[in-house]
């Protein structure tokens, strides 16, 4: 066993232990604790475990050209920073626990609750009729300017979805509200899956985890049982996600995939497992892409502070300012965003290709090595901000759930420019909530 592998295994174990501590931590709102655990599992533990179970060369993208030791180095830097973030979060939250409010205690009454769910159902129908597009079209960089006109409607639907999530989690005693909210969330997820979103398959499972979570049951035995259940669930969902990936990535229909000579069913279990591992690892391996960003896009500090300008101005609708700089972009356009720069280097001819990039590497690419410190500070402060929101009134808690980016949780531990973007969205919404609170107060229970 090599030294890099030993360090890698140690970091994986530390991250798993921190997930356990997060779930047990009473000063953190349960939704935030679970969301952080999900984020760490998806973006850090899953790729970290897969690269140990399978040779890196067989599951990693051959386009990057990185070695296993380079991956271990990138993973160690990112995982170490995340450990610092979680450690600081636990220490600060214990020192300043705040007040644990029940968001449902200030939630709208039955009439207002059904009105919110009714608005959400209308938003889902409108999305089904006018918002659903082909995956490749939705991700095409060349069509970015044409799609921004629907951003306000999309944000409204996502905000209503966050309200439905909160109602489903907190309204277990009100069965009708729970089933209505959960049913609408499932319907919304199905539409997202049809449009090509693989991660949306996990949305109902995440909501069920939210509703059934109890800190008193967080024991090692129960976590092992939950992990085994997750493995069996993944065994069902991952093949479906593989089919979705083939449909959206190659423009094939499901029947064409079934009839294709490229899909071999007699290659053996090892071949199948390696293909599945490659698909999952490719989705969550942001570390190799982060190395590619630093190696082939100018190095540390190349991005500069321009990405923060677009992020800080994201609250201005493009209807008002069509030429508003793209948040996180180094040149103000979608082509200057790290998730588009790396694909343009790896495969210049593919317009709909975007990849996940580890937030620490983005921060270093933008601000130099000082970006690593900014990443730790910004992420810790942002998570504490979300914890405070979740302990406030219903509307503020809804905003926090909206910012959790369920079910991918990719905006929870994120780069500093993305944190600025989230706050630029949150602050105006918080002001609107405070200004409108007197209007809604009569509908509170």
Image: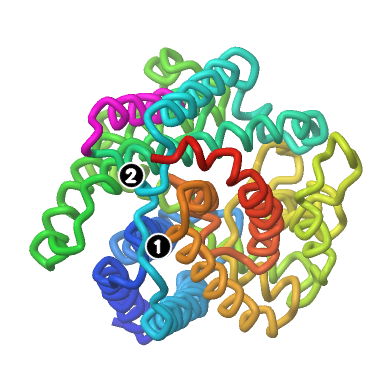
Structural distance between the alpha carbons of marks 2 and 1: 12 Å
Give left or right: position of 9 versus 64.
Answer: left
The residue sitting at the left extreme is: 221
Stretch in magenta: 173-188
Residue at 15% from the left image edge and 51% from the top image edge: 228
**How far across and how far down the image is residue 289, in percent?**
59, 60
Give left or right: position of 283 versus 350.
Answer: left
Which disc number belongs to residue 36? 1
Compared to 190, does 422 lie above or below? below
Residue at 51% from the left image edge and 29% from the top image edge: 196
Q: Magenta segment, principal secondary structure? A: helix
**Nearer to us in this view, 195 or 385:** 385
**Nearer to us in this view, 18 or 382:** 382
Compared to 389, does 83 lie above or below? below
The residue sitting at the front extreme is: 442
The answer to whether residue 51 is seen in the rendering is no
Sequence-wise first label, 2 or 1: 1
Q: How many marks?
A: 2
Q: Is residue 206 magenta?
A: no
Compared to 327, does 140 lie above or below? above
Task: From the image, tell me which residue sits under label 2.
Answer: 206
Compared to 63, does 112 lie above or below? above
In which quadrant is the C terminus drawn? top left
**Nearer to us in this view, 114 or 233:** 114
């Amino acid at each position: 066993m090599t030294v890099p592998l030993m360090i890698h295994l140690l970091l994986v174990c530390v991250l798993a232990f921190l997930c356990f501590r997060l779930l047990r931590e009473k000063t953190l709102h349960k939704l935030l604790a679970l969301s952080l655990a999900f984020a760490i599992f998806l973006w850090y533990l899953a790729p970290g475990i897969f690269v140990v179970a399978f040779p890196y060369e067989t599951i990693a993208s051959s386009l990057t050209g990185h070695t296993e030791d380079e991956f271990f180095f990138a993973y160690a830097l990112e995982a170490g920073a995340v450990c610092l973030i979680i450690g600081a979060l636990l220490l600060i939250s214990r020192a300043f626990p705040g007040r644990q409010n029940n968001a449902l205690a200030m939630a709208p009454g039955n009439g207002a609750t059904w009105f919110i769910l009714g608005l959400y159902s209308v938003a889902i129908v409108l999305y089904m009729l006018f918002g659903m597009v082909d995956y490749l079209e939705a991700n095409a960089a060349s069509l970015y300017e044409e799609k921004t006109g629907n951003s306000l409607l999309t944000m409204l639907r996502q905000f209503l979805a966050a309200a439905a999530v909160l109602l489903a989690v907190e309204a277990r005693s009100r069965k009708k509200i729970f089933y209505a909210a959960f049913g609408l969330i499932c319907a919304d997820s199905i539409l997202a899956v049809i449009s090509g979103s693989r991660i949306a398959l996990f949305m109902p499972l995440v909501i069920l985890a939210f509703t059934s979570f109890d800190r008193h049951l967080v024991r090692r035995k129960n976590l092992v049982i939950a992990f085994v259940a997750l493995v069996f669930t993944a065994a069902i969902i991952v093949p479906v996600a593989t089919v979705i990936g083939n449909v959206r990535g190659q423009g094939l229909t499901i029947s064409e995939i079934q009839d294709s000579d490229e899909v071999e069913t007699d290659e053996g279990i090892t071949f199948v497992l390696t293909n599945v591992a490659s698909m999952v690892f490719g989705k969550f391996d942001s570390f190799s892409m982060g190395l590619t960003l630093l190696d082939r896009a100018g190095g540390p500090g190349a991005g500069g502070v321009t990405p923060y300008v677009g992020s800080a101005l994201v609250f201005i609708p493009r209807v008002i300012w069509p030429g508003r700089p793209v948040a996180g972009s180094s040149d103000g356009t979608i082509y200057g965003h790290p998730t588009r720069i790396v694909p343009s280097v790896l495969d210049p001819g593919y317009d709909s290709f975007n990849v996940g990039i580890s937030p620490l590497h983005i921060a270093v690419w933008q601000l130099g090595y000082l970006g690593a410190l900014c990443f730790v500070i910004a992420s810790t402060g942002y998570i504490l901000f979300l914890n405070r929101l979740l302990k406030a009134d219903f509307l503020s808690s809804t905003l926090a759930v909206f910012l959790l980016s369920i079910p991918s949780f990719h905006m929870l531990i994120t780069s500093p420019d993305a944190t600025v973007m989230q706050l630029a969205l949150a602050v105006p919404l918080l002001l609107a909530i405070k200004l409108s609170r007197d209007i809604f107060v009569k509908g509170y229970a």
